[in-house]
Amino acid sequence: MKTLKYLAAAAASLLLASCTLELQKTTLAAEGDRVAPVLNPVTNVISDANTSKEQVTFTWAPADFGVSTQIVYFVWAKLGEKESIIGTSYDNKLSIAKGDLVGVVCNDLGGAKNDNVSIESYVTAGVYGTSEVKTIKSNVIAYSVFTYLPPKKNIWLPGKYQGWSQFGTMVWEAEAGSNQYKILVDVSNTEETPYYFKVVDEGGNWVGMNDGYKPDGWEVADPANKDGNFSVTAEEPILWLTINTKKKTVAKQVISKVALIGGFNGWNEAEEPSFTYNATDNVWESPVISFTGDGGWLVRLNASWDYKFGSAVPSSDIEGGFEIVQGGGDIPSPAAGDYIVKLHTNRTPFVIVYEKQ
């Protein structure tokens, strides 16, 4: 009898809950009677090296769905046809660091860097916990954001391959303020295997696995190693490393070949010449290439068209250099003559330089 009593009580509870949910649905105000939030103006945002961590605060008058309910707000930024969420809030305000807002404008909306960018913002309100109730949108406000981006930082990658020189192998930040660094490097040497290397961070401190950094998605070759070095086997010396100094991770992609292919060799995949890594100068060097002055060429990794690099753009970092990007089109050949091509892969994008012989 107790079992039947409990079943009856449970059924009654379910019925009551069902009625309550139905009651809440029916007591929401009609769409035309719901009150949208009203977003207050914000002043123009000025960000620089001293203010990038300061906060920008958006405030608004609350929405009203005609019944007491939890409301979730989404704050949006808009530039042209592009829109991006700045953040969410369950209150009538949202604060974001100026530097993070600059990141949204530049990275998500494609705004120009180090420039005054005019954007718009609005707030949408919805009932928390359901997508069945249509969100309501606030008024739109306009303001400008000065998209200050700090200079790119650098770290270092010492190892046996370059004589353990603490500041000898520089790696540049992929994007200013991202805390992410990339380098294509050959860490092999003739004296020891596994091949060991470390990370020296922005502050010049020796760091490694035992100092908080860890491999991301791969196992080190010598897990018994106690001095914090990263290590890889003799079969995988060429690494495309991604180092995140905020998350303290080091990810790797093993590369089998770094080469050139193009009109100079008739686009012959079987005979594409390889670059050789110069650990002293932290640069990849080609053999002497005889360019004819016409016909383009590409850098390829792993002898694969999926890893082609091209579309040369003049570099602002390396004099006489050209930036190349993955998936880019053919690189225009230099004037006819013999050249050594130097490939700088300690930065994003990669940069090529021609040295006339």
Image (spheres, helix red, strand yellow):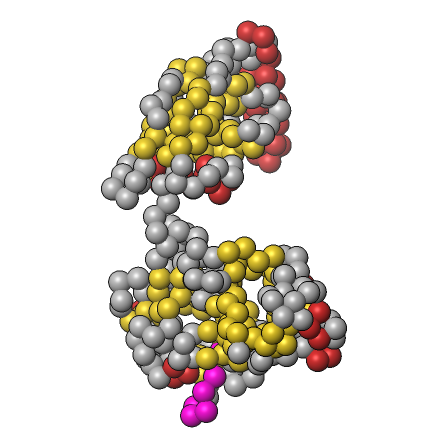
- Visible in this render: residue 297? no
Find the residue positioned furthest to the front.
336
191 part of magenta stretch: yes
343 part of magenta stretch: no
Comparing 310 with 25, the one in front is 310
Find the residue positioned furthest to the bottom.
191
Residue 30 falls left or right of residue 117: right
Q: Quadrant of residue 89?
A: top left
Q: Quadrant of residue 158?
A: bottom left
Number of on-image labels: 0
| Residue in the picture at 46% in, 28% down | 119
Task: Please report the bounds of the magenta region as a residue range.
Answer: 186-192
Comparing 145 with 268, the one in front is 268
Comparing 204 with 14, the one in front is 204
| Residue in the picture at 56% in, 84% down | 235
Residue 324 drawn above or below residue 279: above
Q: Position of residue 102 (x, y in %)?
A: 40, 38
How would you classify the magenta stretch by its main secondary structure? Answer: loop
Q: Position of residue 150 (x, y in %)?
A: 34, 48
| Residue in the picture at 31% in, 72% down | 167
